[in-house]
Amino acid sequence: MSSGSGTVWDAVVGQDRAVGVLRGAVRRWQRDGTGMSHAWLITGPPGSGRSVAARAFAAALQCLDGGCGRCDQCREVLAGSHPDVTVLATDEMQVRKDAVVGLIRRASIAPTRGNWTVVVIEDADRIQEVVATMLLKEIEEPPPRTVWVLCAPFPEDLLPTIRSRCRTVALGIPAPAPIVTFLVERFGVARAQAEWAAAASQGHIGVARRLATDANARRRRRDILRLPLTMRSVADAVEAAGTLREIATEDSAAELEQAQVAEQADWLHAMGVAGADELPRQLKSQWRELLTGQKRRVRRTATDGLDRALLDLTSLYRDVLVVQFGSRVPLVNGDLRSEIEALARTGQPATVLAGIDVISQTRRRLTQNAALPLALEAMTVRLVHR
């Protein structure tokens, strides 16, 4: 997340109520030393901005101006280089025990440069129950200048004993209007393009940004959505499964590369240098840790990219239902109306609903480490015979 010329809160798109809660807590603490909970839980669906809100909150806690986005404290937090802010984002299906133990140790250390020691766990829902009990004691009795910020899709994803000790801030799916405004004002996207991207992303800020600014991302999405039109036999379905995986892999690799380049640039900027070759020797180890962490994210990014492709396919079949029922509800993929109408003529609403269910089942299998080629082939074959 880049702060740009605005505050750290500007990147938390379409979440005015949640931002008000977090920002208000910071202001009250800065004004009279009250209002700050030592454990927070930020919830919301994928793409709603949980991790963005958590990092903005961490920056605001360290900033003398509540998150100005311009000071060294804000810049370092957003770049992931602030010594008093630790962020854990796992690339695996479960958060490792040793990672949580490390966070607990880090939380016990008093802040050195900022106001607080802030520990952010972006995937708190991936903490095993036996490990979560270790975290519970720390959240119950944290050091006086420590703030824990946990992120999860739903409060129920955490143990009741943990969430009961956290102050919960819920994010929703952003409405299209603030996403459009964000894309137009932050990235200079034409309004028509921004409106299309906001609809196609289905409320996912990161996806909307990529679709609005990357022509190749738009091409890959269109290629995925056209695959159902090519499937008329089992052989076609198997081929389509391979193509789907190839496109999703290409897309996730491109997304990862863009994110890594931006993250590296932000980190180097926070360190006050133009390139890695200018880093002083004492910062070389931190640079290597950053690069190592980026490499570990490859597998998870690939899985997330495939899940996104399946969600796009779900939106296509949803649009087919809209056409079949003659509804006036806007299509998510209005630019593919002719393809959608062609699919609508090939089956009944009940079979389309069955197709949506097949895709949903495949998305669930991805979270269970299913063999990707077999899972995708099973899905496309069933879509042919739905």
Image: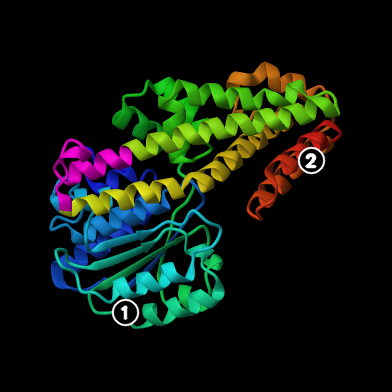
Quadrant of the image for the C terminus?
A: top right
Place residue 114 in its image quadrant: bottom left
The tally of labels here is 2
The reply to whether the C-beta atoms of the residues labelled 1 and 2 are less than 8 Å apart is: no
Q: Residues within 10 Å of mark 2 (few under 14, many from 20)?
A: some
Marks 1/2: CA–CA distance: 49 Å
Q: Residue at x 59, y 29 (%)?
A: 247
**Would you say residue 326 is visible in this rendering?**
no
Q: Nearer the viewer, mark 1 or mark 2?
A: 2
Q: Position of residue 304 (x, y in %)?
A: 55, 44
In what element is the residue under mark 2? helix
Q: Which residue is mark 1?
A: 142
Type of amino acid at the residue the image marks with label 2: Ala
| Quadrant hosting residue 325 | top right
Res 239 quadrant in image: top right
Relative image position of residue 160 (x, y in whole percent) = 53, 76
The residue depicted at 34 percent of the width and 27 percent of the height is 184
Using the rendered image of the protein, determine whether residue 145 is visible from the camera's viewpoint.
Answer: yes
Identify the residue under disc 2.
Answer: 378
Q: Nearest the camera: 322 or 338?
A: 338
On screen, residue 21 above or below 236: below
> Which residue is depicted at the point 69% across and 19% down?
339
Amino acid on which the number 1 mark rests in the picture? Pro
Magenta-colored span: 262-281
